[in-house]
Image: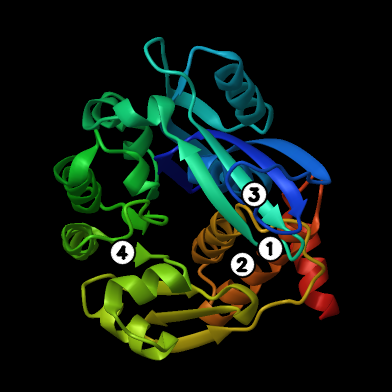
Amino acid sequence: MNRKVCVVGNLNIDLILMSLKTLPEWGTEALVENLNIRTAGQVGYLALALSKLGINTSVIANVGKDHFGREILSQLEKEEVNCGGIDIVKTHPTGVTVAIVNKSGERVLISYPGSMEILGESLVIEHWNLIKETNFLFLCGYFLLPNLSFAGTEKILTRAKKEGKMTFLDTGWDPENWTNEKKKEIRELLKQVDAFLPNREEATVLTGKDSPEEMIKELYSWGPSHIIIKLGENGSFAKTKEGLFYGPSFHTKIFDTTGAGDVFNAGVIYGLFRNWKMVQTLKFANTLSSIFISRKNDKYPTVDEVQSRMGSD
């Protein structure tokens, strides 16, 4: 399997505070049971998961010239991710997201963009050789990259599509709560996207629909050839020209769901690389994600681990 993926977008450190009983009120304090520090952002989770699956992965992003930036580069290089497209900037520190996780494994995110604020189209063009040699371009973290802008994102996706790359988009949640302008931007961008992978909450806001069937049909009409909606504990739902497909979830003890959607995305890419039927691809991606969220350490599963779990269910 010699095909490659280039991931463009938000790269940061996650500070994950786990097992909080309830969110405290302003002016008070609460304790958590665990702390985890990870190379993250949608780019980090996706690239590390892809590399663990044996997929040749490169990254175009940036970090600050600081301790967190060095930690991110060290982790990615350790897992053999191509970091040639990662710019080290002196003017801004590395971005940080604080993930507060409750007893059920669900989380709320609070982010400081840092260096992500200045990632622009010029950085992507500078490292276009990394995109040129890949089969898939995956752009993520749209709302955390204001300098990239709608116009820059559209140019990148359009150029990649014209050069024969399969284009992917996972925007993440809009911190400004989805203004009409932002929703219109996403709809326009989807004209240059082959595969769109929102979660249920994002798909609901974008379409105004209530059921996954209605959401997915509406999103499919906007242009992408693949729509895959992540439904959390309810599995996943996909639409392609072959029809509608449902992938049930794999029940597991949840330690932390932070990054689960990005790891699921890696599973989808693996299935597409293998030219699997969509039902098999969803099963693999759901299983991959379920293993990831159940682990405290050594979180990213190998192909053998996923297939072993699939065979036992």
| Disc 1 + disc 2, Cβ < 8 Å | yes
Q: Does residue 134 appear to the left or right of 81 in the view shown?
A: left
Q: Does residue 253 appear to the left or right of 12 in the view shown?
A: right
Q: Quadrant of residue 294?
A: bottom right
Q: Position of residue 101 (x, y in %)?
A: 68, 54
Q: CA distance from mark 1 to mark 2?
A: 5 Å
Q: Position of residue 129 (x, y in %)?
A: 32, 30
Give the labeled residue for mark 3: 100
Q: Amino acid at mark 1?
A: Leu
User: Secondary structure under badge 3?
Assistant: strand
Query: Could you say which disc has been placed on residue 285 in the image?
Result: 2
Give the labeled residue for mark 4: 194
What is the crowding at mark 3: few (fewer than 14 residues within 10 Å), some, or many (at least 20)? many
Q: Does residue 6 appear to the left or right of 302 in the view shown?
A: left
Q: Position of residue 13 (x, y in %)?
A: 58, 33
Give the labeled residue for mark 1: 288
Q: Amino acid at mark 2?
A: Ala
